[in-house]
């Protein structure tokens, strides 16, 4: 029988037991994978009714699948939203949200410090569809307000931001959006619903690159969005069903499995992240460190207000600039030189030459992405081993 979920349970209990998702047909504790592309109709009229939306059921896995629906339900439950929608990647989520909200001749306002792929989508793809992106420094919310006009449909922010770990005040940004009768979309990838729940702070849509902490093991690519039932149904029918950027049932199952350990993984990421940030802050070869948990971070008080803990992502600058940064990376052993984040493994990269190479030099400067910025996704290994590896590589520059 499904669990009777107690809303007073802690987050760890909620992630393990979900919204009461034990399979009612078989009692399976682990949700089954419905690895089928198509589903049979009871009769011809049933098929017609399904396509008209007058009957409940499944038609074809591009349009819906029981395993994917289970993931969407659990993410909506954890983010405290009404409904969820799964995509084949985080970029598919960003694209489908945009084209569901904007048409040619309209615009949206975005923070300028965001994932490089999202920046490329904004600057290279959306203008070809007649949609204007307006990227501004969102750490000063006056910049967002000034960029809004009567053609603006939504505000997009990523907080904490990729890659420099700047923060945006979600609650105040939501007030600005609603004062102008537009929506606020928050990329919650770095924080996850365990550390931050934007919908409870006034945001209208929350999205994730679920490839990262939601999956947690670096073995699938996925995107997720959570919002009202009205918007999720609109996005599914308006864009996703026809553009086809859907998630596979197997990857949905991997994400459902990842959710069960989200709390324990994030606790370890946060614990290690704080220790590594403090270690780097006092290292003579490190010029600066950006981590929301450090007292001197410009938005430390904001982080305390809108986040449960401070996460496992750190940005820091190597003394000596870009070339010394690369030399440092080439001498690492335990830390894996790779893009992405949120894996059990510690992943480290040089954003301006990799994940954020879609930015021009001028855009990098405007977004406060320094040439010597190193981004580290602190894993769940023994923290002393992570710090030893960083230290031996720093000594060689």
Image (tube, helix red, strand yellow):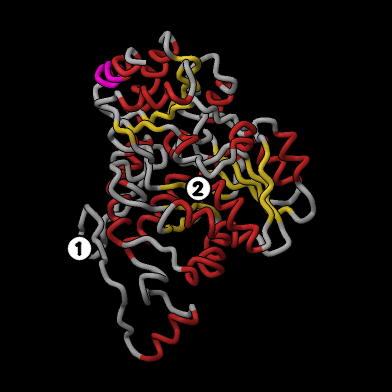
- Asked which secondary structure carries label 1, the reply is loop
Q: Where the N terminus falls, by quadrant?
A: bottom left
Q: Is residue 257 above or below residue 242?
A: above
Q: CA distance from mark 1 to mark 2?
A: 42 Å
Q: Which residue is mark 2?
A: 117
Q: Position of residue 344 (x, y in %)?
A: 28, 35
Q: Position of residue 193 (x, y in %)?
A: 44, 40
Residue 105 is one of the magenta-drawn residues = no
- Secondary structure mostly seen in the magenta stretch: helix
Q: Position of residue 92 (x, y in %)?
A: 47, 57
What are the residue bounds of the magenta stretch?
A: 384-389
Q: Which residue is mark 1?
A: 26
Q: Is residue 217 above or below residue 130?
A: above
Of the residues tagged 1 and 2, which is closer to the observer? Answer: 2
In the image, what residue occupies the spot 66% across and 50% down?
133
Q: Where the C terminus falls, by quadrant?
A: top left
Q: Is residue 250 left or right of residue 300?
A: left
The number of numbered badges drawn on the structure is 2
Residue 388 is one of the magenta-drawn residues = yes
Of callouts 1 and 2, the N-terminal one: 1
- Asked which secondary structure carries label 2, the reply is helix
């Amino acid at each position: 029988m499904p669990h009777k979920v107690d809303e007073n349970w802690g987050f760890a209990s909620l992630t393990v037991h979900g919204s009461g998702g034990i399979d009612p047909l078989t009692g399976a504790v682990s949700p089954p994978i419905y690895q089928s592309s198509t589903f049979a109709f009871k009769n011809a009229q049933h098929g017609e009714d399904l396509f008209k939306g007058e009957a409940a059921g499944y038609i074809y896995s591009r349009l819906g699948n029981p395993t994917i629906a289970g993931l969407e339900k659990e993410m909506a439950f954890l983010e405290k939203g009404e409904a969820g929608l799964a995509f084949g990647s985080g970029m598919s989520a960003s694209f489908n949200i945009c084209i569901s909200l904007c048409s040619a001749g309209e615009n949206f306002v975005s923070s300028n410090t965001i994932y490089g792929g999202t920046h490329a989508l904004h600057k290279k793809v959306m203008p070809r569809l007649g949609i204007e992106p307006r990227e501004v420094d969102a750490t000063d919310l006056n910049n967002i307000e000034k960029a809004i006009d009567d053609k603006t449909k939504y505000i997009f922010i990523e907080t904490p931001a990729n890659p420099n770990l700047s923060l945006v005040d979600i609650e105040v940004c939501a007030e600005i959006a609603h004062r102008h009768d537009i929506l606020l979309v928050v990329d919650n990838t770095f924080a996850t619903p365990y550390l931050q729940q934007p919908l409870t702070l006034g945001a209208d849509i929350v999205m994730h690159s679920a490839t990262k902490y939601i999956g947690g093991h670096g073995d699938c690519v996925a995107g997720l969005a959570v919002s009202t039932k009205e918007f999720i149904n609109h996005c599914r029918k308006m864009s996703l069903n026809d553009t086809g950027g859907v998630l596979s049932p197997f990857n949905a199952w991997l994400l459902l499995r990842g959710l069960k350990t989200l709390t324990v993984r994030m606790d370890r990421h946060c614990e290690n992240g704080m220790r590594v940030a403090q270690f780097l802050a006092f290292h003579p070869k490190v010029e600066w460190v950006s981590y929301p948990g450090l007292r001197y971070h410009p938005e430390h008080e904001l982080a305390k207000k809108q986040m449960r803990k401070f996460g496992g992502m750190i940005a820091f600058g190597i003394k000596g600039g870009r070339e010394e940064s690369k030399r440092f990376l080439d001498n690492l052993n335990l830390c894996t030189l790779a893009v992405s984040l949120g894996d059990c493994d510690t992943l480290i990269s040089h954003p301006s030459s990799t994940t954020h190479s879609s930015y021009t030099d001028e855009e990098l400067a405007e977004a406060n992405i320094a040439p010597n910025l190193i981004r580290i996704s602190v894993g769940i290994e023994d923290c002393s081993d992570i710090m030893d590896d960083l230290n031996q590589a720093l000594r060689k520059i």
